[in-house]
Amino acid sequence: MIRSMTGFGEAAEHNDGVHYFLEIRSLNGKYFKSTIRLPEELQGLEPVLEAAVRRSLVRGTITIVGKCSDRSEAAAHEINHQALDAYIQQLRKTPDVADGSCQINATDLLALPGVLQPPSDDEERYELAKKAFLKLTKDACARLDEMRRSEGALLVDDLLGHHEVIGERLNRIAERAPRVVEDYQQRLLARIQSLLEDAKARVDPTDLIKEVAVYAERSDISEEVARLSGHLQQFRSIVKDSDGKAVGRTLDFLAQEMLREANTIASKSSDADISKDIVEVKGAIDRIKEQVQNVL
């Protein structure tokens, strides 16, 4: 069963007071392109997460958003007392502070460079976050792929619907094509006889046969009908038996080839019935081309 390139998956985990959350969104795209948004202290994980996503998602425009909320005691920054004392001693030498007209604000002191230091176990916390986000990436990709499969089932129904329309119109064209030359011969003979009736002349059968033969060769669409029929069979086979493989590009190529054959049929045939059917065929192929852009 084919899969859509559109999907969404998310996963979350709570571990020792730390809440990890990750979501992955996928839109259609010709190649794999990822955008990763992580907290500043975890941005070093971007290459690791991208590699993990690439193993599951081969195509599409991928957006990955990871969040981390640490409410444990270990998240508290440490106060650099030596730096804080140095700032206080310098401030006390300031006249406004010395005479009491200006008060020292603890909040402002803590915001000074070097006063608050990150937790000393940053490396350990980083490794824990790496392990958690890799697990969440795997879980989110699995949920995204499940949604892709559900969307793919809807795409299959739509694509096979258009395939059926093309097949029906193509069968009518194939049945009509042999009679086109006969109709042309009869119309041509009727016009010539009408023109020569007053002159009491007759048309040479050989000349009529030559004219009809030229028209038959110029308007022969049997090869195009056969090729389009073959493309249709291959298209249906891929749609129904893709087995989860990435087939979007193959289907896009087949749709282009089908449109090429349909355009040739349209340019060769001047029959009104065939022209009407081929317009509907081209319309269905155009809708297929739009839909396969969403196929993985």
Image (cartoon, helix red, strand yellow):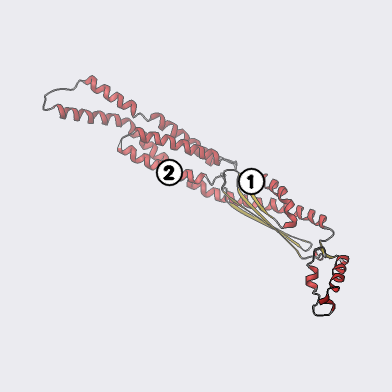
Describe the element under mark 2 as helix, strand or loop: helix
The amino acid type of the residue labelled 2 equals: Ala
Total residue callouts: 2
Residue 245, quarter of the rendered image: top right
Give 11 or 40, whichever is nearer the viewer.
40
**Which numbered disc covers residue 57?**
1
Q: Mark 2 points at which residue?
A: 284
> Looking at the image, which residue is at 16% across and 29% down?
195
Q: Which of marks 1 and 2 is nearer the N terminus?
A: 1
Q: Could you tell me residue 2's position as x and y percent?
A: 56, 44
Residue 77, quarter of the rendered image: bottom right
The amino acid type of the residue labelled 1 equals: Leu
In the rendered image, the vertical position of residue 82 relative to residue 168, given as above or below: below
Mark 1 vs mark 2, CA separation in Å: 29 Å
Q: Could you tell me residue 41's position as x and y percent?
A: 75, 57
**Which numbered disc covers residue 76?**
none
> Which quadrant: the N terminus?
top right
Check disc 1: other Cα within 10 Å, few if <14, some if 14-19, many if 20+.
many
Check disc 2: other Cα within 10 Å, few if <14, some if 14-19, many if 20+.
some
Q: Could you tell me residue 237's position as x and y percent?
A: 52, 38
